[in-house]
Amino acid sequence: MSRPRIGLALGSGSARGWSHIGVIQALGEAGIEPDIVCGSSIGALVGAAYVAGELEILDKWARSINWRDIVRFMDVSLTSGGLIEGRRLMKFFRERHEDTAIENLPKPFVAVATDLVSGREIWLREGSMVEAVRASIALPGIFSPVRKGEWCLIDGGVVNPIPVSACRALGAEIVIAVNLNGDIVGRHGIPKRLAIRESAAPEPETDFLAKLSGDLPAGIRNGVNAIAAQLLGKRSAGPGYFDVIAGAINIMQDQITRSRLAGEPPHVMLMPKLSEIGLMEFDRADESIAEGRRSVARMLPALREIVP
């Protein structure tokens, strides 16, 4: 008999999602190759690169970027439903990765998104791979939504942070899931991230708002810079902008994840420990990828029992 079909459900989690790269690499080294890949948000991005045979290219790029690179991708817009339109980022990916139609990929792949109008979970299974990924990563409050026909699509993590159900629907008999939200709520990591920070050094938020003010009309730029200086200088109380966004999204995704997995549990759950990595800290890929590998090592005995 042939072995059971293996599905890999890659969860949402913004910058923590670089750990998916380490997970996939470690699974391959253990002789475990998924037949079906489904991803939500950053999981869709990494999953698409893997199925397209370009994971090592993504690995190299993710390890090379710094915060200044991240800021350069931010095409700020105040009228598109998000702070960032995402065109520069998608242009970058199209220049370095082949935009294959999803139905022509060598393995079944789904990018999960959410229709903002109906609230429905949308499985993107055909058409442009890059456009599907862009829709799946449209984090509310950060990236603008994506129009696709009658849909207005936002981040898949809003409705299905770990798409176990999609893997099963595509025929997976064994599902390995990667939960990036397992240790971010109710642990010491969140209070630590929201703790008061007293530092004269610019933080990522400062760079972001400096970029934002640079794209505004000159007449209001000085006023924005003055407000930003007060908001983002030395602080004695209160979390920052990205802390609030991250905290709210973390709580939401943790609750949705618990609810969804109670009804559709995977056979093996991998849980990278990434509570110290913030929403937009994409420049910490080395740490994330290494922890992704460690999460596989911790669960290898269980994987050996489940996967023939």
Image (cartoon, rainbow, N blue to C red):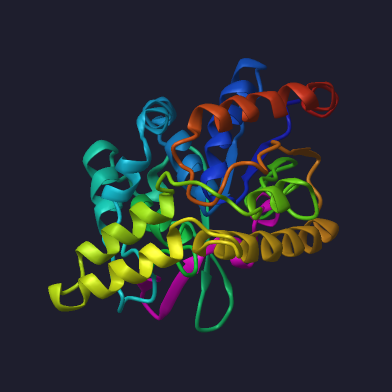
Can you say whether 67 is above or below 58 in the image?
Answer: below
Q: Residue at x 55, y 42 (%)?
A: 17
| Residue 10 shows in this picture | yes
Q: Position of residue 214 (x, y in %)?
A: 20, 62
**Among the 4 quarters of the image, the one containing residue 48:** top left
Can you say whether 181 is above or below 237 in the image?
Answer: above
Along the line of sight, which residue is nearer the eye, 178 or 83? 83
- In the rendered view, does 160 fall on the left or right side of 270? left
Along the line of sight, which residue is nearer the eye, 87 or 63? 63
Q: Is residue 151 magenta?
A: yes
Q: Residue at x 78, y 45 (%)?
A: 266
Residue sitting farthest toward the left:
218
Q: Residue at x 43, y 48 (%)?
A: 203
- In the rendered view, does 114 fall on the left or right side of 192? left
| Region in magenta | 145-167
Q: Position of residue 249 (x, y in %)?
A: 62, 63
| Residue 106 shows in this picture | no
Q: Which corner quadrant holds the N terminus?
A: top right
Along the line of sight, which residue is nearer the eye, 156 or 34? 156
Along the line of sight, which residue is nearer the eye, 222 or 303? 222
Q: Residue at x 54, y 52 (%)?
A: 279
Q: Which corner quadrant holds the C terminus?
A: top right
Q: Position of residue 283 (x, y in %)?
A: 44, 37
Q: Is residue 99 magenta?
A: no
- In the rendered view, does 224 fall on the left or right side of 38? left
